[in-house]
Amino acid sequence: MEWKGRRQSDNIEDRRGDPSMGRLGRGGGFSFPSGGGMGRRGGGLSIGTIIFLVVIYFILKAMGIDLMQVVDGGSSTGGSGYEQGQSSGQTPANDEMTAFVRTVLAETEDTWNGIFQSMGREYEEPRLVLFSGQTQSACGFASAATGPFYCPSDHKVYLDTAFFQQLSRQFGASGDFAEAYVVSHEVGHHVQNLLGILPKFNEARQRMSEADANKMSVRVELQADCFAGIWGKFTQQKGILEAGDLEEALNAAQQIGDDTLQKRSQGYVVPESFNHGTSAQRAKWFKRGFDSGRLSDCDTFSGPV
């Protein structure tokens, strides 16, 4: 996918490095006790304590130990994301992965702005939240374990970019267009939200049994795959797809099918628990959207899927 040098979206909210979302949680890190202990009168340090700390600092300094470097380095957890980006001289706003996500999001904006305009409607562009490890959404707490998702309550897509590494290393779905498929699928849920499909499903789900809700969820997810395929079609028409890109997306769809994931994790499948669709179904509906480029061909709610 020839994405470099193309327009990048401004609808990005980068929360990587947010101290309130670190692994220690809100309020984590170093702090002096607010009463008792070392402090006096509400926690202030006494003159004697300050002199003692200064003496210790210079003693350690003479031994070749710089406490300031120790304190600065102590916030690193050794994980991926913002901390590693800083140590390599990169910032989240400038790394290549961020540029890639911004570009893919911009391409989805161009596609859906055009489609909605052709329907006489205005497309409300979603925001995409980049986070590392964990964050908060209007739909509840999000972590890397949840994977990428769309929250209809705040119209935002949430993505821990470490998922792309997992997609490649654990699921065997590598390539930039495989990663672009993930983003465009979540944007597909946003399109469903704007069209009123997602609100109707969420309302109806409250009255369904778990089995029926899972079946309906499969149809919702497959339609998002089909919408992702529509985006792929428009991207192809721009001439920025490369040989093998379509195969990358189809492989990604197959690798994250419910049946494939269950076989990999537990050795057997439980069809009644499927809520995203089988590998064959996911690849089928992405390809259908890619081949036609029409919303009318993405009706996953009529007939078999």
Image (cartoon, rainbow, N blue to C red):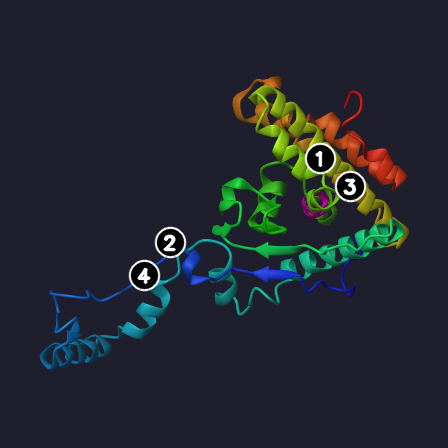
Query: Can residue 244 be seen in the rendering of this structure?
Result: no
Distance between the alpha carbons at the discs numbered 4 and 3: 43 Å
Residue 241 image position (x, y, % from top left): 83, 50
Q: Earlier in the sequence, mark 1 or mark 2?
A: 2
Q: Are marks 1 and 2 in contact (CB under 8 Å)?
A: no
Residue 234 position (above or below residue 199): below
Looking at the image, is 58 positioned above or below residue 12?
Answer: below
Query: Can you tell which quarter of the image residue 244 is in?
Result: top right
Q: Amino acid at mark 4?
A: Gly
User: Disc 2 marks which residue?
Assistant: 25
Label 4 – label 1 distance at C-alpha: 41 Å
Real-space Cα distance between discs 4 and 2? Answer: 9 Å
Q: Which mark is residue 253?
A: 1
Q: Earlier in the sequence, mark 4 or mark 1?
A: 4
> Which residue is at 48% across, 52% downward?
135
The alpha-carbon separation of the residues under discs 1 and 2 comes to 34 Å
Q: Which residues are magenta?
A: 183-188
Residue 232 image point, x, y percent: 81, 46
